[in-house]
Image (spheres, rainbow, N blue to C red):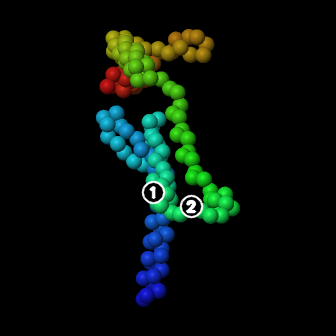
Amino acid sequence: MKFRLGSSTLLLALAGTTASAADIYKSTAPDGTVSYSDRPLGANAEFVSTVGSRPAARAAAPPAVNAPNAAAQEPLPEAPAVPTLPEGPTAAQLLLERQKNCEIAREREQRYTVSRRLYRTNAAGEREYLDDAAVAAARAEAAANVKDWCG
């Protein structure tokens, strides 16, 4: 029984030390909310060093007498570089593109509704008129596109 208790305590102590050595990132949301995570959540995420948060304990320790021991100490690991997000369109560009696609979808839906007969051009460049089922499917697809692009 004592062996189980002792081994369980040792296991929990080891698990606690590995958790404290994990990388932690601090990020701030646009509304000012601060969150901490094990992964960077955006371009404004900062690495928080958990190892460097104990300098007072090191300063209180007596200075090393042996120079070889001081050289044997490893320097603190540097924070990993925060990955940059790939360059992409801005929100304004996306909104402009969405408005343009909405306008195109509405024009196409209006044309499909007004037109009695719809056709598609085949590989030979000739008009191929659609049957009633294909026309209904094209009109339904045009209505779905308006719903998708115009919200």
Q: Amino acid at mark 2?
A: Pro
Q: Which is more toward the observer, 100 or 89?
A: 89
In percent of width and height, residue 13 lies at 46, 71
Is residue 139 visible from the viewing direction of this image?
no
In percent of width and height, residue 8 lies at 44, 78
- As drawn, the residue found furthest toward the bottom would be 1
Answer few, some or many: residues within 10 Å of disc 1's Cα (few below 14, many 20 plus, some between 14 and 19): few
Q: Amino acid at mark 1?
A: Ala
Work out which quarter of the rendered image holds the C terminus and state it.
top left
Residue 77 located left or right of residue 140: right
Q: Residue at left 32%, top 40%?
A: 33
Quadrant of res 5: bottom left
Is residue 4 visible from the viewing direction of this image?
yes
Q: Which residue is mark 1?
A: 56
In percent of width and height, residue 96 lies at 40, 17
In percent of width and height, residue 25 lies at 45, 46
Residue 71 located left or right of residue 115: right
Q: Residue at left 46%, top 47%?
A: 48
Give the label on residue 63, or none.
Answer: 2
SS under mark 2 = loop
Q: Residue at left 47%, top 35%?
A: 43
Residue 52 higher or lower than 149, as above or below = below
